[in-house]
Amino acid sequence: MVIDAHAHVTAPDSLYVYKAGLLAHRGGHGRGSAGATEHDIIDALNKPVFGGSSHLQQLKEAGTDMQIISTRPYQMMHSEHPKLVTWYIEETNNIIAQQVKLFSKVFRGVCGLPQSTRVPIQNCLPYLERCVKEQGFVGCLLNPDPGECSGVETPALGERYWYPLYEKLVELDIPAHIHSAGCRSERLTYSLHFINEENIAVVSLLSSNVFSDFPTLKIIVSHGGGAIPYQFARFEAGALRHGTERFSEKMRHLYYDTVLYSADALALLFKTVGADRCLFGSNFPIEKLWTGYADLVAAHRAAIASLSEADQEAILSGTARRIYRL
Amino acid sequence: MVIDAHAHVTAPDSLYVYKAGLLAHRGGHGRGSAGATEHDIIDALNKPVFGGSSHLQQLKEAGTDMQIISTRPYQMMHSEHPKLVTWYIEETNNIIAQQVKLFSKVFRGVCGLPQSTRVPIQNCLPYLERCVKEQGFVGCLLNPDPGECSGVETPALGERYWYPLYEKLVELDIPAHIHSAGCRSERLTYSLHFINEENIAVVSLLSSNVFSDFPTLKIIVSHGGGAIPYQFARFEAGALRHGTERFSEKMRHLYYDTVLYSADALALLFKTVGADRCLFGSNFPIEKLWTGYADLVAAHRAAIASLSEADQEAILSGTARRIYRL
Amino acid sequence: MVIDAHAHVTAPDSLYVYKAGLLAHRGGHGRGSAGATEHDIIDALNKPVFGGSSHLQQLKEAGTDMQIISTRPYQMMHSEHPKLVTWYIEETNNIIAQQVKLFSKVFRGVCGLPQSTRVPIQNCLPYLERCVKEQGFVGCLLNPDPGECSGVETPALGERYWYPLYEKLVELDIPAHIHSAGCRSERLTYSLHFINEENIAVVSLLSSNVFSDFPTLKIIVSHGGGAIPYQFARFEAGALRHGTERFSEKMRHLYYDTVLYSADALALLFKTVGADRCLFGSNFPIEKLWTGYADLVAAHRAAIASLSEADQEAILSGTARRIYRL
Amino acid sequence: MVIDAHAHVTAPDSLYVYKAGLLAHRGGHGRGSAGATEHDIIDALNKPVFGGSSHLQQLKEAGTDMQIISTRPYQMMHSEHPKLVTWYIEETNNIIAQQVKLFSKVFRGVCGLPQSTRVPIQNCLPYLERCVKEQGFVGCLLNPDPGECSGVETPALGERYWYPLYEKLVELDIPAHIHSAGCRSERLTYSLHFINEENIAVVSLLSSNVFSDFPTLKIIVSHGGGAIPYQFARFEAGALRHGTERFSEKMRHLYYDTVLYSADALALLFKTVGADRCLFGSNFPIEKLWTGYADLVAAHRAAIASLSEADQEAILSGTARRIYRL
Amino acid sequence: MVIDAHAHVTAPDSLYVYKAGLLAHRGGHGRGSAGATEHDIIDALNKPVFGGSSHLQQLKEAGTDMQIISTRPYQMMHSEHPKLVTWYIEETNNIIAQQVKLFSKVFRGVCGLPQSTRVPIQNCLPYLERCVKEQGFVGCLLNPDPGECSGVETPALGERYWYPLYEKLVELDIPAHIHSAGCRSERLTYSLHFINEENIAVVSLLSSNVFSDFPTLKIIVSHGGGAIPYQFARFEAGALRHGTERFSEKMRHLYYDTVLYSADALALLFKTVGADRCLFGSNFPIEKLWTGYADLVAAHRAAIASLSEADQEAILSGTARRIYRL
Amino acid sequence: MVIDAHAHVTAPDSLYVYKAGLLAHRGGHGRGSAGATEHDIIDALNKPVFGGSSHLQQLKEAGTDMQIISTRPYQMMHSEHPKLVTWYIEETNNIIAQQVKLFSKVFRGVCGLPQSTRVPIQNCLPYLERCVKEQGFVGCLLNPDPGECSGVETPALGERYWYPLYEKLVELDIPAHIHSAGCRSERLTYSLHFINEENIAVVSLLSSNVFSDFPTLKIIVSHGGGAIPYQFARFEAGALRHGTERFSEKMRHLYYDTVLYSADALALLFKTVGADRCLFGSNFPIEKLWTGYADLVAAHRAAIASLSEADQEAILSGTARRIYRL
């Protein structure tokens, strides 16, 4: 069985027309709606997407049994006015929820949160609870930088600022998937910002008391953990000198998806954090996915072929099933 | 003959999907394109729009012979990064140019300019020239507040800051249509901002030397001139005391469209500035156009029915034909 | 009977010498006082002012029976340090109170409030209460933009931010007269800022729940309501589509003074909001008042001569008597 | 003979009414004028001022033969918009020039400069030249902090920023009198700011190359040089260790007025900088001058009675006559 | 007996290496420590310092019996991150405490406080209490400008902002020694900033109710009180006119050290505030101390030789013993 | 032969005492000097450093033949005032130059540049030239973020902003070693900032025209290239789709040091970029170097033992010799 644990929604165009409108009238037209009918939603999943055939068709071609779909991170505009963020993210989540309902064998939903530097994280929690309890979402995205490189900073993930969210995650028994959104700096693209934020997230979490304070907290780091599985030894020194838990051991408090697209990188990831902490992810559908989804899945299978069967199973579905309780 | 001198483009959805993408990746995916094919463009004009039938169909129903279409102001996002502004506005203008080419009997184009508070107005001029000479545009929009209420101010239209643009307008012999875009303040909507900016524009222009320095400059003020035809007497005092040209006389240096939707307001406009300075405009298509385009045109005809035939002709087409050289 | 419901205080020069001093020493000399004696105050009203004879003499010449005088708005400097604002406005109000006391048949006072973006509106309320109960003021000015175009924004008048003031106004049963003060932007003068703020005020109030939450609240909008009686039809669309109360009907929740100086504009105002919602106002004494107060009053009488007697009476005194309880 | 080298203009009230107006309309009414007639100016000098009789009368009572009058520093508002600064200071200088013309035996004028942090010091120079050549001013005030404690800083007086002014002073052969203006900080009053700025001015000038680059430059420091004649020894160390010119010697490059009001402080001043570098000054008329001008002058005479006649003469008139070329 | 009441710690180099490190890693290496062993501390006091022989040796040469040592003000970096400030100041205080313990006949300690504009003054109080009760400090420094000229202002010392500190000082019965730290402005050095802040401190305290609210509060002003003993007469006027306590009398609420280096300045200080309010201070060890400590002490003795024996004793030790309870 | 191409200077303590002083007096004491004598410099290299024996001794123990030493990056304080930056970096470079001169068989120097966001990069070039031509430096550090996470951004390394530096590097035929300095954000340590900046640097350079415009430019990326050798496949997509040069091929335009401390990470690095693009580096001496320098070098030798002899030689010395022309 294959579960793709890092994929994003294929929404009708009207969602982005809606977003362009929000950013233009800034709420002056009222909330309105993305106006996506059931028909539009089904249609969107059956039209060609980046790389060839339709979203649903590509899943079949690749042999993916289930896909966990979330909001498109770089569209989430967390640094905009909280009202607009909330409206847009709720509309997106609604479309995801509807896709999951319509195709309940294929999809599971991970919701976006209306995070903003202007409102405390607590404000997102009632909504998160509704997403899980009323709309059936199995996890949420977690953006460690809702300021989106605007210069307005949010405490790093190891800080107590985030504890209300961690409490709620533990209470709901769902994982959070770390994934930043846009980036307003002209020095780097959002894509590189993802990696840099993953570095900050991993080091901040593992240098803090978060996992002793929340031993059952489940956090997944996108894109194979950014730089850290490659750079981890830099962070070993302190523990070696002080005789405390090694950083490389602490890395096993986290989960990592396999969105790396390179067999060598994957091998390093598995060796460093353990295959049992990893979940297959594709990042599908993205414009840049170069060789088509089926090829990507095949390449991924090949890259893990030398692992034990148990490890392969864990990566391809077992860990996802366990932490998402699928 | 009826010429609707204030109308906006009905573009394919892909333009707004493109815009949402630009604001998300901030240039990281490169310029790309709105990807609107000839087919999409024709399709957009034949699909139902706000208020009933299709754009083209409504023109027919209303008996409008020609429509001057421009970019949708509130979508122009002048306060964003200049690169994004330029890309988006060029894509929009390209769609307008293509519509005009495809339906050359019905449409004429007024282009948006990639104005920004971060680049001098001079930077827009070569592009404006290409719009007119290569793409056949007959005028341009002029946003007096490219900062979009962000707190970054641009000199008012009477200041020398704008002289390079006025020189180019005179050289190209085209009018500029004053129309602000978005508004980032939470105190007012873009819609009210239009009116307030029109007030500032009219008073600044008429208190300056612009029309003695550029006697052939053609400026159209949107929405019946904001508050000024109603509030003009407030500005008469200085001239009365100093024996200089009265403000009410100076108001005739400008042109005004008739986007007011009220017979009483129109009557005041004509009485104050003279019917010969007015051009019929509908603001079509806008979501809020309450009774349908045909009704609106009919109501407009009724509202001017008591004017002389010459005045009616001037408003409905004559002035537009003259200043746009149609 | 003629009541001039929009007029300002003619204060002794020492008030402005006092203000210049405050802005220079910024409180270093202590509060001090404007040092206006009863003699100075009587003198000020009997010296020539803008446009000819003395304040008192002009009232007589024009046949005005009573005048409601308030602080000079553009001198109110709300964006300065709250301590200075408070001192200056209290000194001004004291002079007004003394004029009213000295000439109790002729004058009634409308007090300025020491509004500031740096202190909550609540802070002004005990003082407002004292003004009414101890000094006999019959209303207050309300500046919707105490930031005075400085970039520090205050919520628009429809927001709950203002509810404490509205509660107090209702409790005291007095009207507030909307009138902004200075404007620090170089794009527009305070005079145009008045109009633009009136636009924002009217639209914000009428788009909110203020008048359903405070059905007995009395708000007067200066200068004939800014642009709105001319532009109102733009705001009808929403209600027409949704079947809710029309904007043009809602406009009758407010009162409007007649400071417009144009018979045509006045006619539009009366037709749009109803003559019974209007109060005669002159803006006297202002430097720019071109033809003298008596001429202005005569012109105003001529402009309303074609209305019913009841309407004329309402405009000239009735509505003022009713809402100010004179 | 007694020359009072530090005194300020007694202007008609209309100057401050004018200033209050400028700060209210911010230029919207145009430049206008303080409207001070010859009659007003003569009147102002013959009305009671702080401390008893009239300005002219007090001079007579005290036996002062000549007084050098300048703009009132704390009213100069250098941190306001440059346009307003220029208008106000020119109006003030005009009143001074007229007083000097009317009472040419009694008064000499020191002009204020329209300094601003927003315009380079060069911009003031043509006007300074006109003041001297056309209006007969014999020196100028120099504000080392035109930002007025607003947080916008100007380079200290030893920096090359000020060289264009020094060149012009040398060319015109006039002294500059250091005197800061207002202070926007809430931590200190303008009065203390004067002293602190004098400290910065003296130390910056004497630590720089200004007096070797401009050997004939004449600079007078107000208020007995701030703290420096008392604190000078703190600054001796460097020179003592490096064998360079001692700070106490360098202090003689400057001139100091005697606005100290204490015999002991005066004695220290004379001992430290030499009586020949000092000019009698009263700061008249100021509200705080406690015992009347005649008493102050008498006390000053007493305080210097033990000096040599030559020193007394230098202080009371000689140095002023020499450097102002009276 | 001679007590030097204004002197600073001679710390091992490792303290400044530690500081450079803190400012580089900004806490990333953890708090660590200055790593000064008892040996290092003894060594630092026996190595040559500015001006010749060792700290301890110079005391002997000069005949100083006891020295009150505090943190080096200009190194205190109050405007940095509060965490770094706290760490650095605690390390410095620890070194002082250790010196005092090791040389308990010679030294007494005055601690620095971890003041910051980002934390309320209350936060320093538990630490101050520990310094006094556990580490034996006899007083503390008080920086009136922890923003260090950065533009972030702290209320002046007469404001209620400081009352919690004054309460604690009274409760612990210890004096505070006013001494500002660094200065980020490019207009003046920290050295001049000391003087300017002393001016603000003295005037603010004496214009406030602090000494009527805290009659037993003991405040020492550094460097002979800045400019005030020289400029005090400027501040007499108000009291003279209002019949309230004279400023010159109020000056005796404070204590002043004699760090002036000039016999004339000292004489003025004693005459103005009274010798009994003065404490001998050297500022030792500072780089700029020109003639060596022994010379300085000898010069100081000479400068006070003409005073009464009681006054000499008060200055040299009596007042220090009394207010520090030595 | 073993060349350690990433190591930092072991300077006398006085350098950091000097730095602490600069940051305290901010230039008020003048430039002064770190005051490091030849004796101090030799002493510093022979005293124990982090991890055991002395700098020189450890080199011997480890069998390192030559070490390329540069300024300690995290101490470089590029975001401070340019004057302080310049002084501090020049002092540091002088110490490096002296060490190289004294131990010319063992050391080569890489200089720091006085980069600042407040001065254009051009300003550093004459100094760089002197470093190379007069002091014998063989390369320079290049900080891609002189703003040090302060929010003041510098264009990424692919922008034309940096071309003047690239021209000079090519002209002098020396490599630049990318290494950021401090980080003022509280979200991450300087250590993580190094990695994030390397990511931005590599992607920006390889997405630009820099290497086609400067084919002989030599750039070394610290710490094994940050995240990129692990994450590179993410960046392959564009080229694969467009048929342009693959990102993985472009990565060979750069050089990478081997400061990774993990055999697995090193293996990935060599496989991804080629062993011939790699230079051995230790980061010595750093506090966190856990097992001592000799162990580290031994571990590094072991980690590369399975490579070809040519590759081993290239890594250990060949590439360094070639690009540094040793």
Image: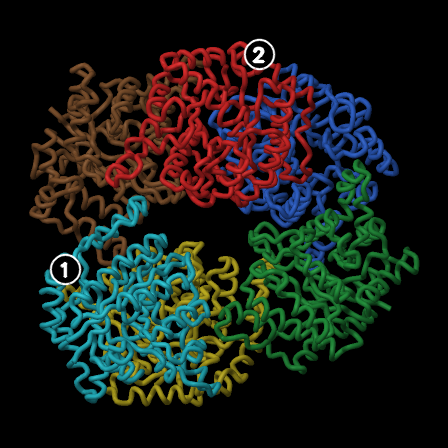
Chain colours: A yellow, B green, C blue, D red, E brown, F cyan
Hey, which quadrant is residue D205 in on the image? top left
Dot 1: element: helix
Dot 1, how many residues are within 10 Å of its Cα: few (below 14), some (14-19), or many (20+)? many
Chain that bears disc 1: F
x 77%, y 59%: residue: B217
Q: Is residue B265 left or right of residue D282?
A: right
Q: Quick check: can you spot residue C71?
A: yes
Q: Is residue B187 left or right of residue A76?
A: right
Real-space CA distance between mark 2 and mark 1, rounded to the nearest whole angstrom: 78 Å
Where in the figure is residue D282, as x and y percent of width and height?
47, 20
Q: Which residue is mark 2?
A: D57
Toward the right, the furthest residue is B309
Q: Which residue is mark 1?
A: F44
Q: Is residue B16 left or right of residue F62?
A: right
Residue name at image x 12 percent, y 30 percent: E62
Q: Vertically, is E95 above or below B312?
A: above
Closer to the camera in the image, E88 or E162: E88
